[in-house]
Image (tube, rainbow, N blue to C red):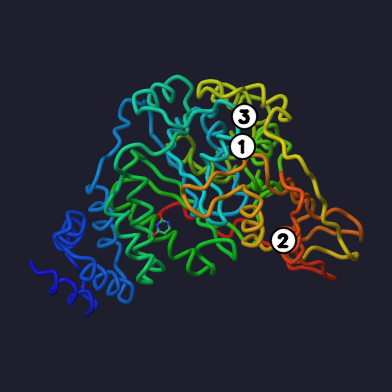
Amino acid sequence: MRVVDIIEKKQMGEELTKAEIHFMVEGFTNESIPDYQMTAWMMAVYFQGMNEKEASHLTMAMVESGDQIDLSGIDGVKVDKHSTGGVGDTTTIVLAPLVASAGVPVAKMSGRGLGHTGGTLDKFEAIEGFKIEVPIEKFIELVNKNKVAVVGQTGNLAPADKKMYSLRDVTSTVQSIPLIASSIMSKKIASGADAIVLDVKVGDGAFMKTVDDARQLAKTMVQIGEQVNRKTLAVISDMSQPLGFAVGNALEIKEAIDTLKGEGPSDLTELCLVLGSQMLMAANKVETLEEGKALLQEKIDNGEALETLRQFIEHQGGNPAVVDDPSLLPQAKYLTEIKADRDGVISDWTAHEVGVACSLLGAGREKFTDDIDPAVGVVLKAKVGDSVKKGDPIVVIHSNTEDISEVEDKLTKAFKISDHSEPIQLIVDTINHA
Ligand code: URA
Ligand code: CA
């Protein structure tokens, strides 16, 4: 096999075989194929695309490039949930205990935040004592005991993806749906998922800016799942404004606790019920979305979801008292309100700008080595569609520095008050089969 022939074949828009795709990925991982040839090949994929078979071979070639976590020691179908990234996306903190309380094991490996989006591990670490670095044997033991554990990635998962992503980043080949889909799916499969639920975000704060692109990405991932025998379902959800009210690590833990008590923001609650229900469907626990939502609502109403959170925090070394007294979470020194300068209705709350503002406060990081401040962030007091009066608070900034003029400026520009607003559809679509 010659690399140039494979590049040319893809350039001409022809379908590549499993052997050709594995040859490219293996060669690039072991450095027998140089960056310039891999770049040419990925650029050909960028322009010509891949069908679902090719994308599945690419996914599995990346899975096989490194370690695969063996979760067979956990009873039941292991369902993982993945979000393509958003601002104030508090869902995993709610879903992990919620789905576990309905009897489906949640063995989740999560990541840290980078840029304007937050990461689930950073959020859990806002709880005093909570440990995310757990050896794999202990991880399995935790899931068997309490049905839920959330830890950092261990092992050398999908190194081919890491290497390819670095190259895509500097050669303008990131925005290719088969390359994104196989990148995401390879990491989920390598970390041991039997079934996968995907939350594909769409809008200004998300990777996918249009509904058409988001739908295409979701469908491609669901098809890959089908090809490689991992039941995969997807939601396409809005990320034009932040999800829920809270953005920031400790603030989102408190918001998740409220949601598990049945007192959370309506958009976050709705999305968690839908994603959670899909997780139950993927694990064959329920048959329909409605059945799953009803079961999860019951677990919120009878307190079992909250009790599962309490035990889950305790089992991972955290202080479970935060569940009953969220003031034990890290608190920022200064609270600053931004108020409405007129009567009207909120017509825009730009998620991306809110994410950047929180990052400036210290809630996020620019590079992986940056430290973050768990206490800081913002709490929105009104969202798109809400009526406000002049002088009403629109957002409260939680900061540990007194001078936050840059953040105030950014946030003031991030929302708009108009005479009327277009409603936002939170859940754009659900994809329950390939
Ligand atoms: N997220 C990923 O994990 N991979 C991509 O290629 C893009 C976004
Ligand atoms: Ca939130």
Please tell me how crowded label 1 is: few (under 14), some (14-19), or many (20+) other residues with Cα within 10 Å.
few
Ligand 1's quadrant is: bottom left
| Identity of the residue drawn at 82% across and 51% down | 337
The part of the image, by quadrant, that contains residue 168 is: bottom left
Secondary structure category for the residue under label 1: helix
According to the picture, the residue beneath numbered tag 3 turns out to be 299
In this picture, residue 52 sits left or right of residue 237: left
Residue 318 pos. (x, y %): 56, 24
- First reached walking from the N terminus: tag 2 or tag 1: 1
Q: Furthest residue to the left?
A: 1
Give the mark toward the camera: 2 or 1.
Answer: 2
What residue is pinned by disc 2? 406
| Placement of the C terminus among the 4 image quadrants | bottom left
Alpha-carbon distance for marks 2 and 1? 44 Å
Q: In the image, which is nearer the foreground, mark 3 or mark 1?
A: 3
Of circles 3 and 2, which is in front?
2
Which amino acid type is marked by label 3?
Answer: Lys
Name the residue that disc number 1 marks.
294
Residue 89 falls left or right of residue 251: left
Which of 34 and 150 lies nearest the eye of the viewer? Answer: 34
Q: Is residue 220 visible in this depiction of the protein?
A: yes
Question: 290 above or below 166?
Answer: above
Q: Residue at x 34, y 60 (%)?
A: 166
Q: Amino acid at mark 2?
A: Glu
